[in-house]
Image (cartoon, grey):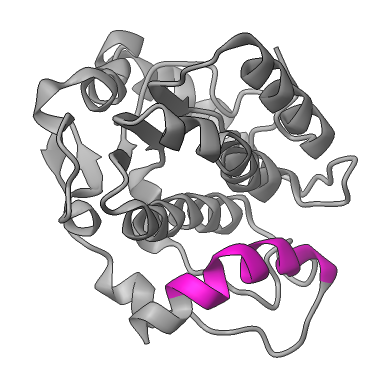
Amino acid sequence: VADMSSQAEVRRLAREVLATYQRLDVLLNNVGGFWAHRQVTADGLEHTFALNHLAPFLLTSLLLDRLMASAPARVVTVSSGAHTTGKLDFDDLMGQRKYSAQRAYSQSKLANVMFTYELARRLAGTGVTATVLHPGVTRTNFGAEDQAAFFKVMQPLVRPFLNTPADGAATPIYLATSSVLRQPQTESLEQGFLRHRRRGPTLARQRRSCRPPARPDSSGSQIRERWAHDGECRQHR
């Protein structure tokens, strides 16, 4: 158990996993939150981005050598259909100038998708596949801690029509276990995003919207230096 919004906790979890398991067949990144009001973690990071994206990004990075040594292996990341409205603003990743819950959430989910695309490209030929998915809108307590008034009113009305947790788990389980994905996929970038076990479209519009930062800043440097500016933006200009 770990508080995934804390980078120290993520590092502790990775150490425990590496000490416990000599082989890793699957890493399933499924952590997320939605906050109506801007919150900051102990690391000084905006909570939505820290939990939804930086936590799985950091954990994957820390476990990647073990996954590669265990090949064939898989990295499966749960994103959201909300990524289609996201835009990565490297000058304000932490929402200090302008914050809205939907903007923060969709940005973090787009970051999940773009990270997976870049990871799949870098892992081509290693026997480790990287995929990302939308589980569907599912009947859970997601976002219950800090909801806007509108959602508090609407949630009881729409809840009966949402996917069951079992429905939401179907696509992650498929990507983690399906024999169809056993062989390395050179076309991973095109296959990466799945909805209800079906391939989703690539993100040409989001790729074109990627902009390099106008100036360095501590909050954006982790993403920029590790993958975003070097991999995503340059690859898709």
Location of residue 6 in the rendering, given as x and y in whole percent from the top left corner: 80, 34
On the question of residue 162 being in view, the answer is no
Q: Position of residue 2 (x, y in %)?
A: 73, 19
Q: Is residue 53 left or right of residue 174?
A: right
Q: Residue at x 80, y 51 (%)?
A: 45
User: What is the quadrant of residue 160 in the picture?
Assistant: top left
| Place of residue 137 in the rendered image (x, y in percent of width and height, measured from the top left) | 34, 30
Q: How many marks?
A: 0
Can residue 14 be seen here? The reply is yes
Q: Residue at x 37, y 33 (%)?
A: 76
Q: Residue at x 55, y 49 (%)?
A: 105
The chief SS type of the magenta part is: helix
Q: Looking at the picture, does residue 184 appear above or below residue 197?
A: below
Q: Nearer the viewer, residue 63 or 102?
A: 63
Q: Is residue 23 magenta?
A: no
Span shown in magenta? 218-232
Q: Position of residue 148 (x, y in %)?
A: 64, 39
In this rendering, position of residue 86 left or right of residue 19: left
Q: Residue 213's image quarter?
A: bottom right
Give the answer, above or below, for where 11 lies relative to 105.
Answer: above
Image quadrant assignment for residue 33: top right
In this view, the residue in front, 228 or 108, is 228
The quadrant of the picture occupied by the N terminus is top right
